[in-house]
Amino acid sequence: MALANLKQTATEARLSELTLPVGGCLAEARRAALSRVQTMGLPGRRDEYWKYTRPDTLTQAIAPTAAVFQHDEAPIFDEFDCLKIVFVDGVFDAEASDDLQLEGVQIDRLSDIESQDIHWSKDLYGVLEARGQDPVPRPLAALNTAFAKDGVVIRVTGKPSKPINLIYNHQSESSDAMLHHVIRIDAGAEVTVLENGPAAARFNKCSEIDIADGGALHMICAQGRDHERRAATHLFARLGEKSVFKCFTLTVNGVLTRNEAVVELLGDDAVVHIAGACVGDGDFHHDDTVFITHVAENCESRQVFKKVLRNGATGVFQGKILVKSTAQKTDGYQISQALMLDDDSQFLAKPELEIYADDVACSHGTTSGAIDEEALFYLQSRGVPRRDATNLLTLAFLAEAVSEIGNQDIVDTIVCRLENWLIRRL
Amino acid sequence: MLNIKNLHVKLEDEDKQILKGVNLTVEAGKVHAIMGPNGSGKSTLSYVLSGKGGYEVTDGSASLDGQDLLELEAEERATAGLFLAFQYPVEIPGVGNMTFLRTAVNAQRKARGEDPMSAADFLKEVRKTAKSLKIDAEMLKRPVNVGFSGGEKKRNEILQMAMLSPKMCILDETDSGLDVDAMKLVAEGVNALRDGKRGFLVITHYQRLLDHIKPDVVHIMANGRIIKTGGPELALEVENNGYAGILAEVE
Ligand SMILES: Nc1ncnc2c1ncn2[C@@H]1O[C@H](COP(=O)(O)OP(=O)(O)O)[C@@H](O)[C@H]1O
Ligand SMILES: [Mg+2]
């Protein structure tokens, strides 16, 4: 089917600014991805899946500029002992990065494997993204597969002694970055990946994650503090038997964020938790779009999203649990909640359940509301000033999402950042 | 200590007068009880004194040790030494009971220009007080009042009262929903805080609590006013004859 004129023009305009990296083992995947983009066209305002979030600044040929935000908080995961991999405006910074050597993992730079003829990641690159295009197209991810020049491919074969920290620094106010990561967790292997930073004025990130039987991946991502930056991220994960994938994202500020997670539970007894906490005010627009497909039996999926919105901020949640007829004994849970700190903000939520198996337990809920005045008065009546009481209740509201993180030290760090955000707005 | 004069209160959003000229003075070290039928305005009085929103004072005054209460924010009233044990303690999901207590204690200390209590001192103090109220460690860890039984909630109020050591305590139907044993426990907790200086205003629907917390003065409230004041014998009269007799007598 031919694309609508407008969409075709917009897509062509965007593609005209990009050049396809040629040759190497990923060439075919890139060409296929480009053809997907051409067939689907880039997202437009009319698209149902983009009803609540305007895609134009994410798709336009030249990225809108975004000031680099100066602040004196140390990078969030600095205090943890990690293997650090640094990107500046979407380009790998070897100098600032650690040696990519760590027992139990094999890490390569995407641009390095590009020149090789064979590499294990060839079987995954663009493959999981392509699977994730059905039933809902995600053209920005295909665009990423086609054109991203940098990123890392990580193969986890054991249980490395420390987390891998991907750091995304933003230095140029006109940077337009694309990163593509592939993470493969071998059977029984386990790793923690921490990501932080705003990355660029405009950031398009695509992560393809393949977790074999009994493997485990813990991901915690903090998207920096820049106010004007824009980001569209995609995460495609495929889970084997008894595998575990837990992902938490912290978003503080940012004029536009669209985080999509697409997860397929293909092996029995697998567990996936996708959680997010975001706080923003003014022109802050934050969109969590999640699609979880239960294929195998007795799997558990949890989606926990909390948004604190102030002074005209917008929160979006589109979350779906699809339970195929084969996925008996599915345990699916989804909650999305917004706390409005004033009357100007809005929360747009579209929770969906689509169930074809009969023996399942699925629940979803979405709420939005103001601070509980009764609780506020209760705290005040004990001597806690109204502002402090408001902050305490706001953190309590976010707690369910933050507590999805298994590691208490990281929980404390995240809570501290959220607290600082609240205090700065007193 | 607590001085309420001609207090008139209406609902902010509605043309409904609830308190119609309350006069009451609680002296330091004394226990005053307020009894009265449901809907007479007892809880409203306690809320207005502690600074809850939604009410409008149309006339009269209320002061604590000479300080005008009605001018202060709720938290300032607490810091000034006023404490309300709620008729319906509020549940706060996501905030641990212990965090709640420590935040409150240290907020009041800060407002008074004192250093925060050390974690160790605080823990010691809480444990000791909690034990006397039969509040176990588990209850201290749980979110504030969430999943607490009626009795647990009321004991938790007394624990907060003990930790904050206010000079004027208002207890709003702390006995309601409690069995005899739980009521005794709560009464003991309150009696332990009677030190000859602290003032108490005990609001109750029934006389039975007053068997355990002996009042010096008993007031009967009806239709937004204190209609009769007397000694402990007044509570017994209510117990035996109900409110009807007193109401009829006043009219
Ligand atoms: N926020 C409110 N909204 C509507 N009516 C109220 C409110 N607060 C109190 N009232 C009314 O005021 C009267 C007194 O209530 P209350 O103070 O709770 O009485 P008591 O504690 O003596 O039972 C009742 O008629 C009650 O319905
Ligand atoms: Mg009452």
Image: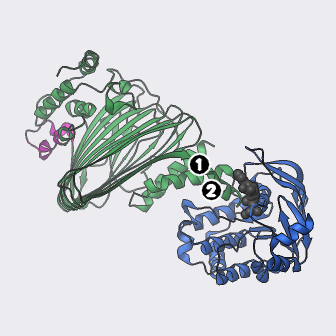
Q: Position of residue A327 (x, y in %)?
A: 20, 56
Q: Are marks 1 and 2 in contact (CB under 8 Å)?
A: yes
**For mark 1, what is the residue?**
A371
**Residue depicted at x 22% and y 20%:** A3
In front of the other: B170 or A123: B170
> Is A267 one of the magenta-colored residues?
no
Q: Residues within 10 Å of mark 1 (few under 14, many from 20)?
A: some
Kindly report the distance in space between the C-alpha atoms of the residues bearing marks 1 and 2. Answer: 8 Å
Q: Colour of chain B?
A: blue
Q: Which residues are magenta?
A: A109-127
The numbered mark 2 sits on a residue in which chain? A
**Residue depicted at x 47% and y 47%:** A367
Q: Which labelled disc corresponds to residue A124?
A: none
Q: Position of residue A260 (x, y in %)?
A: 32, 40
From the image, which quarter does the N terminus of chain A lie in? top left
**For mark 2, what is the residue?**
A375
Q: Inspect the image, locate mark 2, and give the three-letter code of the amino acid beneath it.
A: Ala
Give the structural element (helix, strand or loop) at label 1.
Answer: loop
